[in-house]
C-alpha cells in the first residue's frame, strides 16, 4: 500500500467534482465514488486517503493532516486544518467545480455544504452527520442535499426531520452483491488460530491514547493460558503512515512479553480484509467502522477505548445513544461487549475475561444477521448519476 501524496499546491484547470473525506472510514467509502466520477469523464479532486487516490483522486492537501480524534486532539491542529479547509473552499467556489461529494467528516463538510448550497451547486453527502446521536438540528441544513446513508435507522432518523435519505450498499458487501454471493453465511475464522487482533484506532492520537490499555490486555492474553502454545498478538493499522510511529511506541515499551508483536496494514481490498480479520481467534477494537467489518467477518470481538477527558465529559452530557459499536447500533441491542472509560487499568481484567469467553458460533450468527440487514441499497454509480444529472 502506497503512502498518500502530499502536494503543496494543486491547480485544477478542468471540470472536476470536489471530494472531502477526512478519515480512513471515509476513504473506504469514497473509493467507488471516485471511480464512478472518472468513468463519466470528470476529474475527481480534493482530500482523501490512499484508496481514493489510487482510484484517481487528485489530492489537493495532505490527507495525513486530517484524521484527528477528540476535542483536545483537535486544538493543536487548528492552524493546519484551517489551511486545508481554505484550500477546499477556494476550489469549491471556482467555476470548474461541478459538484461536491462530502463524506462523513462534518466539521469540514457541513461548512462546505452551506457554501455549495448558496452557489447552487449539487451536493452528495455520503455518511452524513449522526443526528440520531447528537446535534439533530443539522438535519434541516441538509434538506437540499442528496444523502446516502448506510443504515436503515439513519434513514428513519432523517425522515423524522423531514429530510429524504437513501440507502447506500455497504462497501464491505459490494463485491458479494455484484457477484450474487449474498448472504455471506460462511465464517472465514480459523478456530485453531490463537492470534489476538488489536485495532487501537485509525487516528494516531487515538491509537497512542489506547495503546497502554490494548497492550495491557495483550500482555494478559499472552500470559493467561500458558498451556495454550502459540498465542500471539497482531496490531492492525488503517494505513501505512501509522506503522512507524507505532513501531517506535512499541520499542519504548521494553516488555519482553510483547517483543514479538507484529504490525500489519489493513488491506485495501475488502475480501483481503475479511481474510485477515478471520485469521484472528478474537479481536479488540475501538468503536468505528472496523467493528462492523470484524462482525461481518464473523470474528469474535470486544470493543474498548479510552477517550480524552473533554470528549468523555461532553459525550456523557450530550450524546443520546448508550452504545457505540456499529453492530450494537444496527441490532439495537448489545451483541458486542463494550468497555469505554478513562481508567484503563481497571478495565483490563474485565476485557480479558470477556475475550476468553467469546462464543465463535454467536459471532458467526451475528455475521449472517448483519449481512442480511446491510445487503441492500444503491451502489455509488446510482448516486453519481443522480448528482450530475439532477
Image (tube, helix red, strand yellow):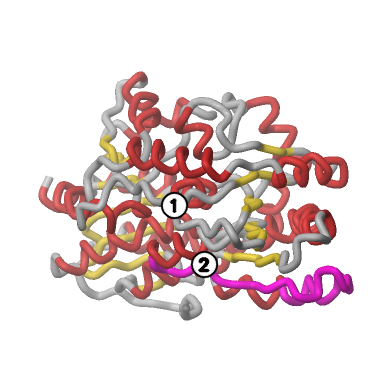
Would you identify the image quadrant in which residue 157 lies?
top left
Callout 2–callout 1 Cβ contact below 8 Å: no
Mark 2 / mark 1, whichever is N-terminal = 1
Range covered by the magenta-colored residues: 247-269
Is residue 39 visible in the rendered image? The answer is yes
Secondary structure found at label 1: loop
Magenta-drawn stretch contains 261: yes
Res. 16 image quadrant:
bottom left
* Residue situated in front as seen by the camera: 15 or 185: 185
Q: Position of residue 55 (x, y in %)?
A: 31, 71
The residue shown at (21%, 55%) is 178
Instruction: List the residue tagged with mark 1.
Output: 187
Pick whichever, 322 or 58, lies toward us: 322
Q: Nearer the viewer, residue 38 or 258?
A: 258
Q: What residue is rendered at 66% in x and 66% in y?
A: 235
Q: Which mark is residue 266?
A: 2
Q: Residue furthest front?
A: 227
Residue found 31% across the figure and 60% down from its top:
18
How far across and how far down the image is residue 111, in percent? Answer: 43, 45
Amino acid at each position: 500500500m502506497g503512502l498518500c501524496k502530499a502536494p503543496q499546491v494543486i491547480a485544477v484547470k478542468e471540470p472536476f467534482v470536489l471530494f472531502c473525506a477526512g478519515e480512513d472510514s471515509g476513504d473506504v467509502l469514497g473509493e467507488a465514488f471516485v471511480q464512478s466520477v472518472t468513468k463519466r469523464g470528470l476529474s475527481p479532486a480534493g482530500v482523501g486517503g490512499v484508496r481514493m487516490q489510487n482510484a484517481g483522486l487528485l489530492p489537493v492537501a495532505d490527507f495525513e493532516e486530517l484524521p484527528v480524534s477528540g476535542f483536545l486532539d483537535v486544538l493543536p491542529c487548528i492552524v493546519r486544518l484551517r489551511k486545508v479547509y481554505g484550500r477546499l473552499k477556494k476550489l469549491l467556489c471556482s467555476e470548474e467545480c461541478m459538484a461536491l461529494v462530502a463524506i462523513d467528516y462534518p466539521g469540514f463538510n457541513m461548512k462546505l455544504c452551506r457554501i455549495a448550497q448558496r452557489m447552487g451547486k449539487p451536493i452528495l453527502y455520503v455518511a452524513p452527520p449522526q443526528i440520531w446521536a447528537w446535534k439533530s438540528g443539522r438535519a434541516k441544513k441538509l434538506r437540499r442535499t442528496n444523502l446516502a446513508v448506510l443504515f436503515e435507522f439513519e434513514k428513519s432518523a432523517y425522515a423524522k426531520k423531514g429530510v429524504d435519505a437513501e440507502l447506500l450498499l455497504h462497501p464491505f458487501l459490494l463485491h458479494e452483491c455484484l457477484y450474487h454471493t449474498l448472504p455471506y453465511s460462511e465464517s472465514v475464522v480459523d478456530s485453531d488460530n490463537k492470534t489476538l487482533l488489536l485495532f487501537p484506532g485509525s487516528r494516531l492520537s487515538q491509537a497512542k491514547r489506547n495503546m497502554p490499555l490494548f497492550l495491557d490486555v495483550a500482555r494478559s492474553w499472552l500470559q493467561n493460558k500458558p498451556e495454550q502454545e502459540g498465542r500471539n498478538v497482531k496490531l492492525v493499522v488503517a494505513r501505512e503512515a501509522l506503522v512507524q510511529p507505532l513501531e517506535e511506541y512499541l520499542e519504548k515499551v521494553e516488555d519482553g512479553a510483547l517483543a514479538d508483536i507484529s504490525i500489519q496494514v489493513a488491506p485495501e481490498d475488502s475480501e483481503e480484509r475479511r481474510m485477515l480479520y478471520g485469521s484472528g481467534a478474537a479481536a479488540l477494537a475501538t468503536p468505528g467502522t472496523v467493528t462492523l467489518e470484524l462482525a461481518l467477518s464473523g470474528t469474535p470481538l470486544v470493543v474498548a477505548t479510552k477517550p480524552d477527558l473533554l470528549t468523555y465529559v461532553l459525550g456523557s452530557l450530550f450524546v443520546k445513544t448508550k452504545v457505540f459499536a456499529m453492530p450494537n447500533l444496527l441490532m439495537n441491542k448489545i451483541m458486542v461487549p463494550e468497555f469505554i472509560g478513562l481508567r484503563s487499568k481497571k478495565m483490563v481484567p474485565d476485557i480479558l475475561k470477556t475475550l476468553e469467553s467469546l462464543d465463535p458460533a454467536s459471532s458467526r450468527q451475528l455475521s449472517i444477521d448483519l449481512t442480511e440487514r446491510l445487503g441492500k441499497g444503491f451502489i455509488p454509480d446510482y448516486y453519481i448519476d443522480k448528482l450530475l444529472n439532477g
